[in-house]
Image (cartoon, rainbow, N blue to C red):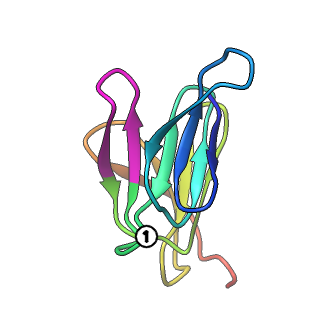
Amino acid sequence: MRGARDRGRVALYTGAGGGWTQVRGATDRVFTSRTTLYATDLTTGDIEQYDRGRGTWTRIGGPGATFAATDDHLYGVSPDHSGVFEYTGANGAWTEIGGPVAP
């Protein structure tokens, strides 16, 4: 899955030629894993996950200092840098896996 942020919109690559479909308006940051698209809300900083089948965004966590996605996981650093968390993939649940992190 590929996502891109371009001048106030988030688009999803359709897989055909140069085709992109807009899936969201303005956002702060975009993160992608192999199968999932994530974005932070421009106003709140909350992290949201895109449901491709439904075409909807769901809040999965609050704001973070930063986030990173790998092929299969999403990680976040708490706003105060006191911990590193991994998203469990269910109901907005996160597991602390380390920290603190230098700002």
* Crowd band around label 1 with a 10 angstrom C-alpha radius: few (<14), some (14–19), many (20+): some
* Placement of 43 over or under 31, stated as above or below: below
The residue lying at 43 percent from left, 55 percent from top is 25
**Which residue lies most toward the top here?**
16
Say which of 47 and 70 sits in front. 47
Chain part drawn in magenta: 48-59
- Residue 89 is situated, as x and y percent measured from the top left of the image, at 39, 36
- Residue 43 is situated, as x and y percent measured from the top left of the image, at 37, 75
Which image quadrant for residue 98? bottom right
The residue lying at 33 percent from left, 51 percent from top is 60
User: Amino acid under label 1?
Assistant: Leu
Residue denoted by label 1? 42
The residue lying at 38 percent from left, 51 percent from top is 48
The residue lying at 60 percent from left, 21 percent from top is 14
Count of marks overlaid on the render: 1
Say which of 65 and 6 sits in front. 6
Magenta segment, prevailing SS (helix, strand or loop): strand
- Residue 87 is situated, as x and y percent measured from the top left of the image, at 44, 46
Residue 52 lies within the magenta run: yes
Screen quadrant of the N terminus: top right
Say which of 21 and 102 sits in front. 21
- Residue 84 is situated, as x and y percent measured from the top left of the image, at 55, 64
**Which residue lies most toward the left here?**
91
SS assignment at label 1: loop
User: In the displayed structure, does residue 17 sit left or right of residue 74?
Assistant: right
Screen quadrant of the C terminus: bottom right
Residue 61 lies within the magenta run: no
* Placement of 48 over or under 81, stated as above or below: above
User: In the displayed structure, does residue 48 sit left or right of residue 69?
Assistant: left
